[in-house]
Amino acid sequence: AQTVTQSQPEMSVQEAETVTLSCTYDTSESDYYLFWYKQPPSRQMILVIRQEAYKQQNATENRFSVNFQKAAKSFSLKISDSQLGDAAMYFCAYRSPYNNNDMRFGAGTRLTVKP
Amino acid sequence: DAGVIQSPRHEVTEMGQEVTLRCKPISGHNSLFWYRQTMMRGLELLIYFNNNVPIDDSGMPEDRFSAKMPNASFSTLKIQPSEPRDSAVYFCASSLVAEPYSYNEQFFGPGTRLTVL
């Protein structure tokens, strides 16, 4: 079964600086989807960025980018020019393309942004 | 679109009482998911519907939990009787599964925070 590991329970970054959140996963599948979700205090789960495993190019969404290392099964999230509104829990998630209901989430990383 | 709607946002009840959580998926979506989030276990999938039919309920913790989807625009998650260990945030998510093996984003509702005393 696929597992997702986020080894950093908490991270802190200074406003306007860059921070990287780590995520590793375990799978025997060659095709899959990876996601980063943001959960602010409002509890809403917001999709930040996604990556298809068959794409070699790292996904980018404005200040958010990923470093996808398929061989290492690593999927880190980089937040550039951190803003106070980035403070939230961040969850890494894996989903198999063969099973739409099989979404596995990591335990989450709580990001604090210091002014 | 208003997104996935869940009610109530907060529920406080006493042990032994019946609790019903409600979800309205995004119009046109054909898949619906119920998740539970706790500090100890993180986000767990409880049950998944496709075209109103329960497909996988292996995540439902025990017989006290039941879920229904009587039509494409409404689903309920019921706990009877409730216990303190059921305290958690329950999320509903919906998705449009247009093709198998394709990317189908799940859109999450705001969640219901359940506290069982």
Image: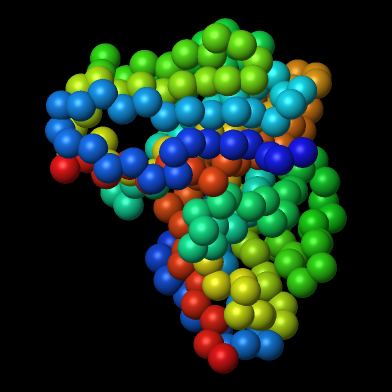
What colour-coding does the image apply? rainbow
Q: Going 53% across and 36% down the picture, which residue do you hit?
A: B6
Q: How many marks?
A: 0
Q: Is residue A104 visible?
A: yes
Residue located at (61% from left, 80% from top): A84
The percent coordinates of residue A114 (x first, y second) are 53, 87
Residue at the image point whose x is 74% and y is 32% from the top: B104
Please indicate whether residue B55 sits to the left or right of residue A18 in the image.
left
Q: Quadrant of residue B27?
A: top right
Q: Nearer the viewer, residue A29 or B10?
A: B10
x 70%, y 62%: residue: A67
Q: Quadrant of residue B16?
A: top left
Is A35 or A113 nearer to us in this picture? A113
Q: Position of residue A107 (x, y in %)?
A: 43, 52
Residue A47: x and y, percent?
67, 51
Which percent across, then down, holds residue B105?
71, 37
On screen, residue A103 versus residue B47, left or right, reads right
- Does any portion of residue A96 appear in the rendered image? no
Q: Looking at the rendering, in which quadrant would you find the C terminus of chain A?
A: bottom right
Give the side of residue B26 with respect to residue A22, left or right: right
- Please tell me which residue lies in front, A7 or B44: B44
